[in-house]
Amino acid sequence: VMACNIFPNPFTDTVSITLESVVNYIQCEIFNLQGKSVYANQYQGTKTIYLELSGLDSGVYIIRISNNEGTNTSNIFKY
């Protein structure tokens, strides 16, 4: 499973995701607690991803980051 660091958590507007190494392809998806996808994007050739999430309501979300090496799922909290 791919290692990554998600910060800050809790966040207000922006989340940064730092991967252990540069990846050719990565899928990032965020779900609310009802299981509805509220954000989805794909990235290529990067080690750091910045997500602009100011449009989300305050609360708890599930972030899923995946590529061919595996999937990392974590909770994130928006103020």
Image (cartoon, rainbow, N blue to C red):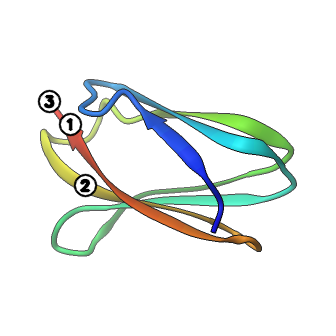
Quarter of the image that includes the N terminus: bottom right
- At x 67% / y 43%, what residue is drawn? 19
Where is residue 49 drawn, in percent x and y? 62, 36
Residue that carries the numbered disc 1 in the rendered image: 78
* Residue 20 placement, left or right of 6: right
**What separation in Å lies between label 2 and label 3 (alpha carbons)?**
11 Å
The amino acid at mark 1 is Lys
Which quarter of the picture shows residue 57?
Answer: top left
- At x 37% / y 35%, what residue is drawn? 53
| Contact? badges 1 and 2 (CB < 8 Å) | yes
Which quarter of the picture shows residue 24?
Answer: bottom right
Q: In the rendering, which numbered label is found on residue 23?
A: none
Q: In the rendering, which numbered label is found on residue 79?
A: 3
Q: Nearer the viewer, residue 1 or 56?
A: 1
The amino acid at mark 3 is Tyr
Give the structural element (helix, strand or loop) at label 2: strand
The amino acid at mark 2 is Tyr
The earlier-in-sequence mark between 1 and 2 is 2
Where is residue 46 drawn, in percent x and y? 79, 39
Q: How many residues crowd around disc 3 within 10 Å: few (fewer than 14), some, or many (20 or more)?
A: few
Residue that carries the numbered disc 2 in the rendered image: 61
- At x 25% / y 41%, what residue is drawn? 56
**What separation in Å lies between label 1 and label 2 (alpha carbons)?**
8 Å
| Contact? badges 1 and 3 (CB < 8 Å) | yes
| Contact? badges 2 and 3 (CB < 8 Å) | no
Q: Is 64 drawn above or below residue 34 in the view shown? A: above
- Please tell me how many numbered marks the rendered image carries: 3
Where is residue 28 drawn, in percent x and y? 55, 57
Give the structural element (helix, strand or loop) at label 1: strand
- At x 23% / y 62%, what residue is drawn? 32
